Image (cartoon, grey):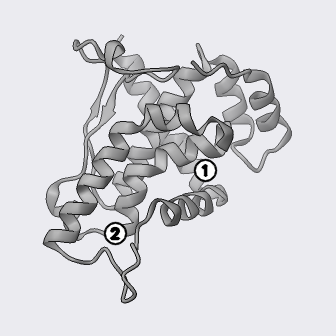
Amino acid sequence: MIQIDTKPVVEEFSDDPKLFGEQMSAWLCSSPSLNHVIVCLHEGTHLLYSRAVNFEPKLYGPSEENFYIHRIGWRRKLGAVERPSLGILLTADILLIGKYYLGPAYIEERLLGEDNWKEIWDGARFDHENYHGWLRQRSYIVGDTLDAQGENLVSPAKIRKAVYADFEQPEFRKRLLAASREYESFLNGLK
């Protein structure tokens, strides 16, 4: 199980307004746990990239199924964001769909540090599996996943680079924070 000291994270946001600024710092300080913030950021990232492909997803909260048995480490499945429809998955910008699947884990890597990759990807293993399933399906049906040299157009490395570039943009961070807080409000409304 990963142990994260939240103090350096809070100090990083407090000292560097370019990241999320005062709102993110306040959210981290007022949240019940860093786990809560990470889950909201994870699902908020899915929400943000869903909207980028013109899909308004349904949000889901805690399930009556016992996800805690199936999940490992410090991240637990508290909810979900509906996946875009098959028509969108097969026709939307291929990089945006790749970001939809893998973006949440790359945002977590960016915020928590790449040295926590094992715990991050253990928590995102279903997203990773769904990404590979989508990639196989899109490759088979549409055939637009490879460039002229046979290179994967949406390899995890390319998606990571694109997500990190998105994160460097202040407007993206603003929208990410808003989507994450929206997901948190949805969860709070279920209580």
Residue denoted by label 1: 173
Residue denoted by label 2: 94
- Residue 92, above or below 186: below
Q: Which mark is residue 79?
A: none
Q: 10 Å neighbourhood of mark 1: few (<14), some, or many (≥20)?
A: some
**Residue in the image at 54% along x and 64% along y:** 162
The spot of residue 58 in percent (x, y) is 25, 38
- Where residue 109 sits, quadrant-wise, is top right
Three-letter code for the amino acid on which mark 1 is drawn: Arg
Secondary structure of the residue carrying tag 2 is helix
Q: 10 Å neighbourhood of mark 2: few (<14), some, or many (≥20)?
A: some
Q: Earlier in the sequence, mark 1 or mark 2?
A: 2
What is the residue that sits farthest to the bottom in this orientation? Answer: 148
What is the residue that sits farthest to the front in this orientation? Answer: 150
**Residue in the image at 33% along x and 70% along y:** 93
Secondary structure of the residue carrying tag 1 is helix
**Residue in the image at 48% along x and 44% along y:** 104
Residue 181 seen in render: no
Separation of residues labelled 1 and 2 (CA atoms): 22 Å
**Residue in the image at 63% along x and 35% along y:** 116
Asked whether, in this view, residue 113 is left or right of residue 188, the answer is right
The spot of residue 48 in percent (x, y) is 43, 50
